[in-house]
Amino acid sequence: MRPSYEPAAGAVRGRVGTPDILSMLALEAALEVWDGVTVEAVRAKSLALTDFFLECVGAYVPEGRVSRVTPLAHGERGSQVALRCADAGDVMARLIERGVVGDFRHPDVLRFGFTPLYVGFAEVERAARVLAEVLA
């Protein structure tokens, strides 16, 4: 070790040997929120969110504008919904401009992910409503 400190160049400068105590305390508190939350509970909320999104899309989106790619059966899907849409790339760009962030897969698929640990039903409803507005 040298007597004077010389910081490294670039991102390497951020590496430290000892984690910052205040940061670790904040992390510990954030993780404690999830103590006692089971994988089964997370899965149940995931399915409830995706069911609700599909229900809202069915109620809000103009008939024939999208078709569902994601299976309805709970055992056949994860925590995302895929919809087929003729102008999916443009639609996703317009959704992102309005704060609804999903992704687009060529040639015509919109994908929406629902992370059950921090996405709520109000956000899911808003995503479906904004999708309907963009598609109207």
Image: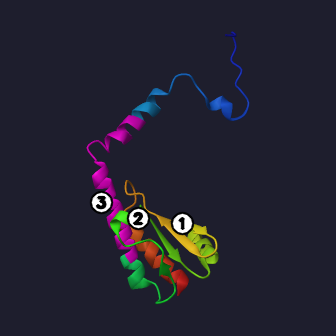
Earlier in the chain: of badge 2 and badge 1, it is 2
- Give yes or no for residue 53 being in the magenta stretch: yes
Which residue type does callout 2 highlight? Arg
Q: Which residue is mark 3?
A: 44
The residue depicted at 42 percent of the width and 61 percent of the height is 79
Residue count near mark 3 (Cα–Cα under 10 Å), binned few <14, some 14–19, many ≥20: few
**Which of the two residues, 76 or 87, is positioned nearer the viewer here?**
76
- Give yes or no for residue 94 being in the magenta stretch: no
Mark 3 secondary-structure assignment? helix
Gap in angstroms between the C-alphas marked 2 and 3: 12 Å
Mark 1 secondary-structure assignment? loop
Q: Which residues are magenta?
A: 27-54
Q: Which residue is mark 2?
A: 77
Position of the N terminus by quadrant: top right
Mark closer to the observer (2, 1): 2
Q: Which residue is mark 1?
A: 102
Residue 113 appears left or right of 93: left
Residue 113 appears left or right of 44: right
Residue 103 picture quarter: bottom right
The residue depicted at 62 percent of the width and 80 percent of the height is 87
Image coordinates of residue 40 in percent, x first then y, are 28, 53
Residue 106 appears left or right of 33: right
Image coordinates of residue 63 in percent, x first then y, are 46, 90
Mark closer to the observer (3, 1): 3
Gap in angstroms between the C-alphas marked 2 and 1: 17 Å
Mark closer to the observer (2, 3): 2
User: How many discs mark residues in the rendered view?
Assistant: 3
